[in-house]
Amino acid sequence: MIQNKQCRLAKRPIGMPNAENWNIVTEELPELKEGELLIKTMYISLDPAMRGWMNEGKSYIPPVGIDEVMRAGTAGKVIASKNPDFKEGDFVTGGIGVQQYGISKGEGLVKVDTSIAPLQTYLGVLGMPGMTAYFGFMDLGKPQEGETIVISGAAGAVGSVVGQLAKAKGLHVVGIAGGEDKCKYVVEEFGFDACVDYKSSDFKQALKEATPKGVDIYFDNVGGDILDLLLTRINRGARIPICGAISQYNNTTPVKGPSNYLSLLVNRARMEGFVVFDYAPRYREAVIDMVGLMKKNQLKAKEHIVDKDIDAFPETLLMLFKGENLGKLVLKVAQEDEVK
């Protein structure tokens, strides 16, 4: 029998998750039934949204239950199948969760072509973060050539893609990131016109200098004080897609809302939240467009890969909230030559 190591939610966190919130367990996999397939996990996606999934309460998706395998997007290889739609050797992405193996009936799994892009890229630019960036920017941002866009979390999986899409559309692109090294990386690696360090003492002045014509689109990944500040810089008719609020996810006090919201009224601007899963019927549209940009070298896929075991998931997740990742954070739990 195959032994399957899993990371399960032990209890709900208060503030930043710690070791007490997880149990690492190993159990035997049952035999495959007709219609099922067995997947060996190779890569696990780590996303800021995971912190919200750990909380109890109403949201756009049910919370992870206590003693359930932690929810996560994964990429892996089919190693056995009794499902006619999948064969041994297929590479697939889906929501197998934080575990070495997954048994599935095929719902929610997508076969991917590793001749087009490496497997891990289907968890980044061609996966949920890429879809989030694409539809948040294109549908809510409604970009026009020559406009100015500011993107917080610019070095992350979503922000870095939004910036590259914006450059391809002819916008003036300004990122916000933490630290000089990250800001330099965003400009040199992803082609942003400028990137402002929110940790610097002159952040407000630097942002003003980087956006001399004001801000037409603000793509918000962080919320909090930065969102409040950007509301003072928006132009008439500005659009503000609300993608996330990573600065607030580990709060033990109420979430901080924007005090400058009347700027939306004065500037006839729009601030709107969105959830990427609502766009699932259109994912193919985004993938085709983004693969085309990749072939033109207008879109780079950058994954920050941590090559460790399932046991490393809890500590690796914290990298997101400490700002330690550059690009899409992925936990690699199996080498390709191990998957047979």
Image (tube, grey):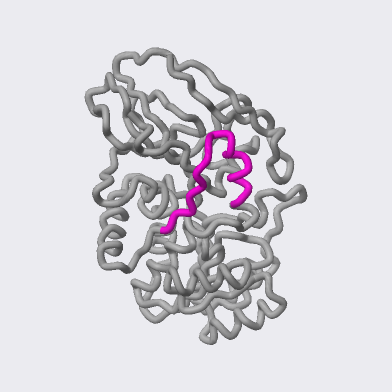
Q: How many numbered marks appear?
A: 0
Image quarter where the C terminus lies is top left
Q: Residue furthest front?
A: 337
Q: Position of residue 12 (x, y in %)?
A: 68, 34
Q: Which residues are magenta?
A: 302-319
- In the depicted view, which residue is nearer to us: 246 or 181? 181
Image quarter where the N terminus lies is top left
Q: Is residue 200 above or below residue 223?
A: below
- In the depicted view, which residue is nearer to us: 143 or 336? 336
Report the residue at 58% width, 70% height from top: 181
Q: Residue furthest right?
A: 253
Q: Position of residue 185 (x, y in %)?
A: 51, 69
Q: Position of residue 97 (x, y in %)?
A: 48, 33
Q: Position of residue 74 (x, y in %)?
A: 43, 38
Report the residue at 45% width, 17% height from top: 29
Q: Is residue 61 left or right of residue 55?
A: left
- In the depicted view, which residue is nearer to us: 126 or 26? 26
Magenta-colored stretch includes residue 143 = no
Is residue 126 visible to us here?
yes
Q: Is residue 23 left or right of residue 165?
A: right
Q: Is residue 244 left or right of residue 276?
A: right
**Res 34 → quadrant:** top left
**Res 73 → quadrant:** top left
Report the residue at 40% width, 68% height from top: 164
Report the residue at 30% width, 37% height from top: 91
